[in-house]
Amino acid sequence: MQQQDTPLGTEGTTAPELVENISSTGADTAAPVTDAPEADIIPSLAEQLRSAELKAAEHHDAWLRAKAETENVRRRAQDDIAKASKFAAEKFAQSMLPVKDSLEAALATENATLESLKQGVELTLKQLVSAFQGANVVEVSPVGEKFDPNKHQAISAIEADGEPNTVINVLQKGYLLNERVMRPALVVVSKAKPAA
């Protein structure tokens, strides 16, 4: 068996003697042993700090750019919404211009006969119906249908044969815009006759 070196010449000493020898030599106040000298640690920390500062600056710059881009997108979206609401009726208004032109032409015609005026009004009505179709405006004329309070407005109820609450007369047509009621139809509905 190979003999190991013992510190401070303590070969063959007991543990209490060893503790006494260490405290008398002042070994507990010795400087800690480091793997690298202090000069190597300081430049390494300085480099790490500089690298962290550069990364922080890059991240801050990227954050500022992202914030500016988000602000630009928000501003463009607000402008688009404002333009959409301002010019929402533009397509419909353009389709109504020929109707107005036809009405003005009919009024400007001298010596128009009743027949020519009637034909002009019929053509103008066709233009108007075409404009409504282009804007998804649908006419509601519910004669013979069951009364629907969501689409119809009953003006009166009269006794009639058949099922009660059926539309028997339309006083004014209603209109839907994309399935939404613009104006309910004004109707007369039936009610049951009293028992004899």
Image (cartoon, rainbow, N blue to C red):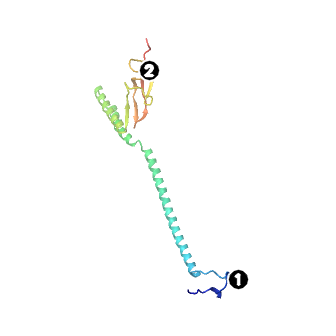
Query: At 43% across and 46% down in the image, what residue appears?
Result: 84
Q: Earlier in the sequence, mark 1 or mark 2?
A: 1
- In the picture, measured across the screen, residue 57 lies left or right of residue 160, that is right
Residue 111 appears in the figure: no
Q: Which residue is mark 2?
A: 157
Q: Which residue is mark 1?
A: 20
What amino acid is at disc 1? Glu
Looking at the picture, tell me which residue is in the foreground, 162 or 144.
Answer: 162
Residue 81 appears in the figure: yes
Q: Quadrant of the N terminus?
A: bottom right
| Quarter of the image where one finds residue 186 | top left
Query: At 71% across and 84% down in the image, what residue appears?
Result: 24
Q: CA distance from mark 1 to mark 2?
A: 119 Å
Query: At 30% across and 25% down in the image, what residue appears?
Result: 114
What amino acid is at disc 2? Ala
Numbered disc 1: secondary structure: helix
Looking at the picture, tell me which residue is in the foreground, 83 or 104.
Answer: 83
